[in-house]
Image (cartoon, grey):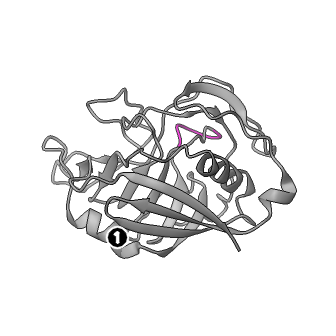
Amino acid sequence: MKRKSWALLTVLATLSLGLSGTAAVAEPSAAPATAAPAAATACTYTPAVPADNFKGIPVFDAKKAAKPYSAKLQTSQGTITFKALTDKAPCTTFSFRFLAEHRYFDRSHCHRLTTQRIYVLQCGDPTGTGSGGPGYSFPDENLDGATYPAGTVAMANAGPNTNGSQFFFVWKDTKLSPAYTPFGQVTAGLDVLQKIAAGGEDDQNNPGDGFPTLPVNFRHVTVTKH
């Protein structure tokens, strides 16, 4: 995701907003990891910086990773629940479960809302700046033919195989390049996301891309096995 004025930004790509001269909105990105990207075929978690609110580095367990689960995110604006795509993105869903079970996301907030051309709410950075990370990175998954309809939950990144803790909710059908691992599907709370989007964002210099006006604070994230 494009970095804001209050964070060191790395813009991966932009989407044109037509011929009006309005500033383009960047696709989702996250803080770059300094470690070399892991091989795309390996489900490994590679030490990297930054390591904000460090909870350790998960050790992949294929048996546990295969077990379906749902995540319930209790936020200051309402509850959002999504089904994890454990069969399609096992590395990603295993990482998310690891972080949730270690309360990594608790007391963090969503730091970016886009309302023009791309329609996402980005979360998962405990620093709230868009430049934070969990202390490790891991490979992309589930990108072949990836699309981003409303309700998609996908990873933000800073290039191929640089996933960390930052992720985004798609609150309205969005066209993105297939470069962001889809790992969940909202099953309840899409109305919450749309309420947050309707509240707008606060960036006067780059309208349509800023901090959500309605604060989205994560109180607790619960993982429930199916």
Extreme-left residue of the structure: 204
Instruction: Give the x, y percent position of residue 95.
Output: 67, 48
Q: Residue at x 42, y 54 (%)?
A: 219
Instruction: Give the x, y percent position of residue 188.
Output: 47, 76
Label 1 element class: helix
Instruction: Give the x, y percent position of residue 214.
Output: 23, 56
Q: How many numbered discs? A: 1
The secondary structure making up most of the magenta span is loop
Q: Amino acid at mark 1?
A: Val
Q: Residue at x 52, y 57 (%)?
A: 221
Q: Residue at x 61, y 46 (%)?
A: 99
Q: Is residue 198 above or below residue 191?
A: above
Of 127 and 150, the residue lying toward us: 127
Q: Can see residue 46?
A: yes
Of 15 and 158, the residue lying toward us: 158
Q: Can see residue 177?
A: no
Instruction: Give the x, y percent position of residue 194.
Output: 31, 70
From the image, which quarter does the C terminus lie in? Answer: bottom right
Asked whether, in this view, residue 210 is left or right of residue 75, the answer is left
* Magenta stretch holds residue 180: no
Q: Quadrant of residue 85?
A: bottom right
Asked whether, in this view, residue 214 is left or right of residue 33, the answer is left
Q: Is residue 117 above or below residue 132?
A: below
Q: Which residue is mark 1?
A: 192
Give the crowd class for mark 1: few <14, some 14-19, many >=20 residues within 10 Å: some
From the image, which quarter does the N terminus lie in? Answer: top left
Of 1 and 132, the residue lying toward us: 132
Q: Which residues are magenta?
A: 157-161
Asked whether, in this view, residue 177 is left or right of residue 92, the answer is left
Q: Quadrant of residue 216?
A: bottom left
Of 71 and 191, the residue lying toward us: 71
Q: Residue at x 15, y 54 (%)?
A: 20
